Image: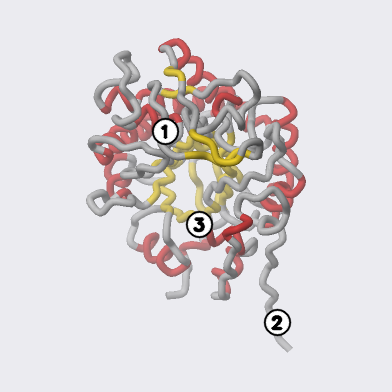
Amino acid sequence: MNPQQLFTPMQLGRIHLRNRIVMAPMTRNRATPDGLPTAMMVEHYAQRADAGLIVAEGTWPEVTGQAYCRQPGIETAEQVRAWQRVTDAVHARGGSIVLQIMHSGRIGSQHIKPAGVRSVSASAIQAAGQIWTDAAGMQDHDVPVALTTEEVRAAIATHGAAAQRAIDAGFDGVELHGTSGYLSMQFLSSSTNQRTDEYGGDAAHRVRFAAECLQAMSAAIGADRVGLRLNPGNTYNDTSDENSGATHAELMRQAAKLGIAYLHVMRAPVPDIDAFALARENFGARLILNDGFDAHSAEAALIAGLGEAVSFARHFVGNPDLVSRMREGLALSKFDRKTLYTAGEEGYSDYAAAVTALPA
């Protein structure tokens, strides 16, 4: 199969894609300790600007939501200016880029956040497992403080303010991170949400936090510049739900009512949920599909009507020129797993583009 649909342009709300190959958000830990995007990040994203859309890595809207060492933020004016250099570089190459807004909630450590900054969640339930800290090596996740109802509303407002700062930084839109066990999913999941107010209880109430974050973001910048990423069945970072498919379907319906630009849906890691079909039924069109695709399977998914675009993560790590490699049918380079989260340029912005011989 020779991919064709992958290379046709499309529109997702107000966001223009010159092809349907999307770069998925990937935490890479190359920001400064205080969350400023760096020069190597400018180069990294510019190298990959041929993507129809780049979804920049999960970025904290306030420092309470920082999960990882060297993770960027979008809270301060200095961070906005630093991100502007990234968006300017991508736009100079004709690309489109949105920012994934990610509040980590209970995922993180006091050894990562500034002194005195607490970790928060829907309920005061500590996540199992540990997290790397540059200051003290592997550490248990913090025991989070349960947000009061008023603090929940303040956190929702923070998402709207972060969306506006992302637009101020030159992004074409934003994406709410609704999976991988971070704050939105901590509210969504029955295992991590034991609240008795309007943000807890049955699925209709547990999805309220994420839905109201989308509302706040939409009010700030327009729903046609807002996306949502979901992964029904995901249990990463010690989250689980009594009926993940039904809970996610409820959130999908709420998101559809808002008229957001797109839903970025990952293949379910469990056999009893067809995440793509669930999204088509409950959200509708404007789907970006993710997880486990290559050029041919992505083209087949588009032809079958499963979605409108396909995102790639690992393939973009070692292939800054992934779009042209797919177009020309060239082999893909492998990437070095050991340098995925290290601090330097090695394994980040130093992967070479393919060199094709010119015809004689």
The image position of residue 304, as x and y in percent, is 33, 61
Task: Tell me which residue sits at (60%, 41%) in the image.
Answer: 137
Between marks 2 and 1 in the image, the one whose residue lies nearer the viewer:
1
Looking at the image, the residue that sits furthest to the bottom is 360
Colouring chosen for the image of the structure: secondary structure
Asked if residue 147 shows in the view, the reply is yes
Task: Tell me which residue sits at (46%, 56%) in the image.
Answer: 310
Measure how far apart labels 2 and 3 are at the Cα level.
26 Å
When the figure is inspected, residue 275 is found, relative to residue 72, above or below; the finding is below
Task: Tell me which residue sits at (66%, 36%) in the image.
Answer: 135
292 lies left or right of 342: left
Asked if residue 92 shows in the view, the reply is no
206 lies left or right of 102: left
Task: Tell me which residue sits at (41%, 52%) in the image.
Answer: 289
Q: Secondary structure at mark 2?
A: loop
Which quadrant of the view contains residue 212? top left
What type is the residue that disc 2 sits on?
Ala
Please name the residue that numbered disc 3 is placed on.
312
Name the quarter where the N terminus is drawn: bottom left
Circle 2 crowding by C-alpha within 10 Å: few under 14, some 14–19, many from 20 = few
Circle 3 crowding by C-alpha within 10 Å: few under 14, some 14–19, many from 20 = many
Please name the residue that numbered disc 1 is placed on.
127
Please name the residue that numbered disc 2 is placed on.
357
Q: Nearer the viewer, residue 107 or 305?
A: 107
Q: Nearer the viewer, residue 215 or 199?
A: 199
What type is the residue that disc 1 sits on?
Ala
Q: Nearer the viewer, residue 245 or 303?
A: 245
What type is the residue that disc 3 sits on?
Phe
